[in-house]
Image (spheres, rainbow, N blue to C red):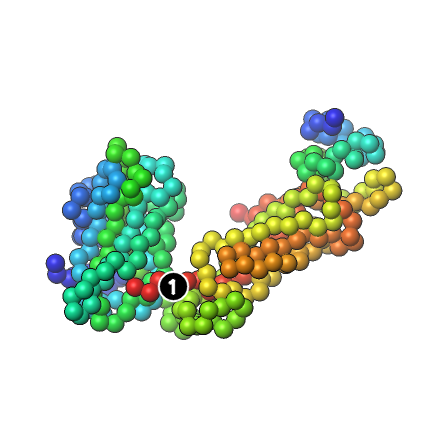
Amino acid sequence: MGSDGLSINIFNIIDASQHPGRDGYVEPNVEDARNRKYVKVFGPNHIIMDTGWYQPNSFLGLHEMSVRWYTDSLVEYGAVIEYWKRDQAGNQTLSHKIDLHFMNDISDEFGNKAGVAYFHENMEYKIIIKSHPSVAHDEYVAVDYMSMLPVDKQKVLSPIVHAGVDGVPAIATERDFWISIQGDGSNYKYSYTYYFPEPIVSYFYPVATAWGGGDYYVAFHNWNADSITMWGVHRGGNNWSGSLTVTGRIVVYESVISL
Amino acid sequence: MVTIDEIKYNADAILADDEKMKEVIQDPKLVIQLLETKKVYNLKITVDGEDFGLVRSIEPPI
């Protein structure tokens, strides 16, 4: 299969209707779809979109990938995206696969994230989107388009900070958190564990504030690869009860998919 | 047993009653209702001669 290359990707958008998969049909007159068309399938394991092989170096470097798609299925994951690569000797491999979780007003509005992916030199790539195996036979999955936002290479670091693995490529991202710590009157401090929403390779120390009229503070007390644990502490050491808001932010190094 | 409705309609009386407050502070839902009724986010109280903190969450801005 040939490549469409730069001519179609100059705006970093891959329209599913230009690359329908073998099981998909192009549905016209879809009001809010780009170009008023999307590609639709019913049931599980059907190929919705297949870009075919792009010539080597059509995409280079780091890209934030996202897919705008629709489904009436309520399963946790409605679609699967596969990144395939082929080297100069013609060996092709499935480089990476991600299950996509449908989020109302996000997946069908702005698209949801399908990884931060690094495309290497001198490799051909193709991208396939399928309906997830857990989709029922009478449920549909439709793909409007995929977008590829180039990411600043300067932000790709080999982290040398806390808990990092040397040489692992990662991208710095700021995460906000807004949580409530519950107290039942039995202690002056209570614990809460915040789990990072994306897999990460490392992180900087967070900053956080407790909203309790100045009578409370936050103390971090445990660090893990996927979470941090903090206490909500009464400043005077008095027992407390209720729910304490803690807001904070942390710089994390998210994993990058090396395709 | 202290109920949500009792707090809604008689918060000051419960605040003045040590026995009832001992019960309230063990249940974050009752504490939050008490603070909502009093229209405050944070309150310092004394129960059985011991200082005690009551606090409720704030809503994120839209």
Task: Give percent across and percent down for residue A68.
Answer: 31, 49
In which quadrant of the rendered image does the C terminus of chain A lie?
Answer: bottom left
Task: Give percent across and percent down for residue A148.
Answer: 31, 60
Task: Give percent across and percent down for residue B55.
Answer: 70, 44
Find residue A113 and report its image quarter: bottom left
Label 1 belongs to which residue?
A256
Residue type pointed to by label 1: Val
Q: Residue placed at 74% from the left, 49% from the top?
A: A188
In which quadrant of the rendered image does the N terminus of chain A lie?
Answer: bottom left
Whether residue A249 is visible to the viewer of this picture, yes or no, is no
Q: What element carries label 1?
A: loop
Q: Nearer the viewer, residue A6 or A179?
A: A179
Q: In this view, does A103 lie above or below A250?
A: above
Q: Mark 1 lies on which chain?
A: A
Q: In this view, does B51 lie above or below A256?
A: above
- Residue at the extreme right of the image, as rendered: B49
Q: Is residue A187 left or right of residue A256?
A: right
Q: Residue placed at 51% from the left, 59% from the top?
A: A225
Whether residue B51 is visible to the viewer of this picture, yes or no, is yes
Question: Total label count?
Answer: 1
Q: Is residue A168 above or below residue A95?
A: below
